[in-house]
Image (cartoon, rainbow, N blue to C red):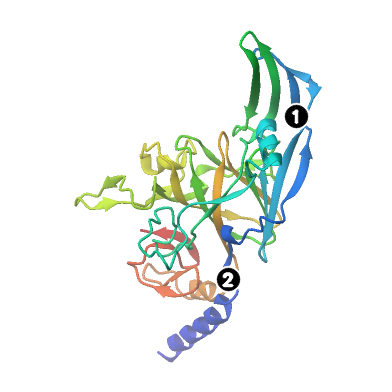
């Protein structure tokens, strides 16, 4: 008995010391929209041709608007690349390359405010309230030009969109790049406005996709109060948790066929010193923020070495012990999983 208590005490001491440094969180509402950098893009950007035959011999350029943020282990670089006609509106002040959107912010003066785009309803997941949205579809090649027709001048825009067979990241568009300094688990709060557009995670360092079976999804459809189905007892279901669908359409998790905007979380493991790109291939993916859980040798590893049992203690990502009724991302026997 004394040995058991000694092991538990050692684990709790290690857990207490370790829990202070484990989570790293960045929230979109902390984005510095007064410090947006610009980059002129010319590679695979063209400016001529016709509707039937875009001309790759006429070079052009686009302006990408870049926001950077970081935690101890993650450097985020966010790109927003509007089309030329959209950028003209940005220059005039009629549009913004980056915007904070969503109605999830808490308003003490209006406690009954509709907050159905807030990500703060589920235990085990980080709370987020607004998301950051950029412009431009991620693509390999972009053509944009004015064409004279019998009906007047028409503005033409063509893109060769990113596909899973790719061996590089997009040349332009709205995408999120995560450079890692440590290995661990990355949870992204996302807003996916177009329900039938795939979402990809691409390891740009190794030139390989993160396959759907390596990505966990927890998503609301339309808003956080929309019941997409009922369970066997007739109770409404709001959050759909499971693996990424094989077609990489987040809304199709667990075979659901909702074609609605969605908001929620995607979770995947990352290695140290890699670059990961996250985006919708033919749309713009909004980001509420991210939560990073570094992999460390900690008390959970000690517990794992002592006993690999089905009834081993369960912990949340903050290192707190939770019950088997707890829902969300948990760690048991040193293994991360989603407990439903």
Mark carried by residue 44: 1
Residue beneath disc 2: 22
Q: Quadrant of the C terminus?
A: bottom left
Q: Which mark is residue 243?
A: none
Q: Nearer the viewer, mark 2 or mark 1?
A: 1
* Res. 262 in view: yes
Q: For this rendering, which residue is in front, 339 or 174? A: 174
Is 37 left, or right, of 245 in this rendering? right
- Residue 165: image quadrant is top right
Along the horizontal axis of the image, is 32 left or right of 313?
A: right
Relative to 175, residue 47 above or below: above
Q: x, y (%) of residue 45?
A: 75, 29
Q: Position of residue 296 (x, y in %)?
A: 60, 69
Q: Residue at x 57, y 74 (%)?
A: 298
Which of the two residues, 148 or 284, is positioned nearer the viewer here?
148
**Separation of disc 2 and disc 1 at Cα?**
41 Å
């Amino acid at each position: 008995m004394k040995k058991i208590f000694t092991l538990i005490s050692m684990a709790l001491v290690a857990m207490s010391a370790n829990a202070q440094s484990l989570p790293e969180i960045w929230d979109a509402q902390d984005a510095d929209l007064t410090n947006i950098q610009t980059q002129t893009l010319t590679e695979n950007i063209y400016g001529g041709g016709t509707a039937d035959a875009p001309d790759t011999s006429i070079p052009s350029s686009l302006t990408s608007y870049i926001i950077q943020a970081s935690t101890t282990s993650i450097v985020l670089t966010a790109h927003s690349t509007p089309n030329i006609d959209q950028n003209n509106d940005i220059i005039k002040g009629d549009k913004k390359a980056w915007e904070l959107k969503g109605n999830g912010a808490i308003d003490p003066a209006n406690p009954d405010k509709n907050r159905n785009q807030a990500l703060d309803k589920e235990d085990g997941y980080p709370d987020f309230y607004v998301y950051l949205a950029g412009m431009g579809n991620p693509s390999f090649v972009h053509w944009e030009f004015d064409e004279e027709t019998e009906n007047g001048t028409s503005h033409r825009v063509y893109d060769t969109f990113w596909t899973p067979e790719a061996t590089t990241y997009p040349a332009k568009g709205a995408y999120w790049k995560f450079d890692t300094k440590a290995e661990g688990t990355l949870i992204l709060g996302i807003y996916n406005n177009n329900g039938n557009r795939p979402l990809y995670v691409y390891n740009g360092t190794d030139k390989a996709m993160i396959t759907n079976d390596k990505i966990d999804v927890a998503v609301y459809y339309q808003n956080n109060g929309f019941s997409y189905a009922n369970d066997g007892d007739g109770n409404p279901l709001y959050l759909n948790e499971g693996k990424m669908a094989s077609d990489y359409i987040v809304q199709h998790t667990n075979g659901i066929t909702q074609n609605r905007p969605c908001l929620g979380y995607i979770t995947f493991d990352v290695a140290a010193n890699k670059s990961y790109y996250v985006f919708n291939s033919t749309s713009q993916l909004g980001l509420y923020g991210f939560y990073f859980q570094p992999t460390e040798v900690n008390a959970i590893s000690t517990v794992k070495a002592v006993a690999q049992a089905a009834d081993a203690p369960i912990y949340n990502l903050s290192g707190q012990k939770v019950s088997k009724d707890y829902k969300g991302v948990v760690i048991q026997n040193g293994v991360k999983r989603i407990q439903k």
